[in-house]
Amino acid sequence: RFSIFCSNLSLLFSFKSKPALLNLRLKIAFMKKFINIKNFKKTIVAALVIFNYITLEAQSVITYSGQALSPGLVNSSLSNSRYNEPHGIAADGNGNLFVADRLNNVIRKISANGVVSTYAGTGQAGSFDGPSLQATFNEPWAVAVDTLGNVYVADTKSYKIRKIDASGNVTTIAGTGIFGTTNGPGNVAKFGFTTGIAVTKDGTILYACDYNTHVIRKIENGNVSNLAGTV
């Protein structure tokens, strides 16, 4: 029975077109006649696993920007630019990418037309707020972008959550700069090595992975709380 289904997997390879999706639904409905309904879910899952494996094998991986094993801080074209242990990446709705360039202590921007620039930070470690190219970061690990053009930064070794607004100003949303687990207003809350960050589309709620304190934090209306996990 499974072999019958596998013999029809070829249709899956044109997955991108709507007719192919319709054909897939029809094929699945047809194959139900040949497969015991109790085992149908297991069979379709197994078939899709094979499909995913073959699809992934058929893809190719390229270096989009930077050069392997050649760290640095160079703004240029995609291939001539350099990074130093980039740790996080996020995209906006216009096709721009923002990179947490960890050991360079900066946030980089890869524009939709392939130009790499320093979006915020001087390259010096610190946690100074202000205009984007005067502000400092300390090993930022993650970035997130809302639909308003604001970029949020998990400024990991500053123990802060930072914001780069659409006008290019950097501010601290939460964190005192001291390691800890304190919840409450952003200016008294403490973080413990935040390595991941996510934001709602409108930028009203932030979520942060607090690596060394083993919790997921939530920032809403200027207040920090534990969403999940136990310190």
Image (cartoon, helix red, strand yellow):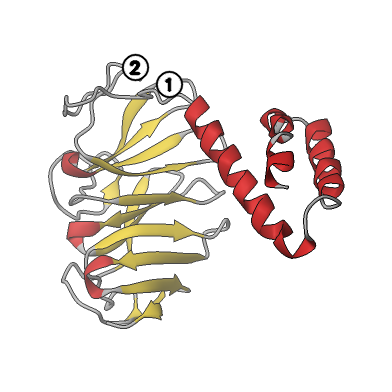
First along the sequence among labels 2 and 1: 2
Quarter of the C terminus within the rendering: bottom left
Q: State the image quarter where residue 17 is shown.
A: top right
Total numbered badges shown on the rendered structure: 2
Residue drawn 51% across and 41% down? 92
From this view, report whether residue 112 is shown above or below residue 167: above
Amino acid type, residue under disc 2 in the picture = Ser
Where residue 128 appears, x then y in whole percent?
20, 54
The answer to the question of whether label 2 and label 1 lie on touching residues, with beta carbons closer than 8 A, is yes
In the image, 139 versus 25, the foreground residue is 25
For the residues labelled 2 and 1, the Cα–Cα distance comes to 6 Å
* Residue receiving disc 1: 114
Indicate left or right for 17 with 119 as reference: right
From this view, report whether residue 4 is shown above or below residue 176: above
Regarding mark 1 in the picture, which secondary structure is present there?
Answer: loop
Residue drawn 82% across and 44% down? 25
* Residue receiving disc 2: 77
Q: State the image quarter where residue 65 is shown.
A: top left
Amino acid type, residue under disc 1 in the picture = Gly
Where residue 211 appears, x then y in whole percent?
26, 66
Residue drawn 68% across and 38% down? 6
The answer to whether any part of residue 95 appears in the image is no
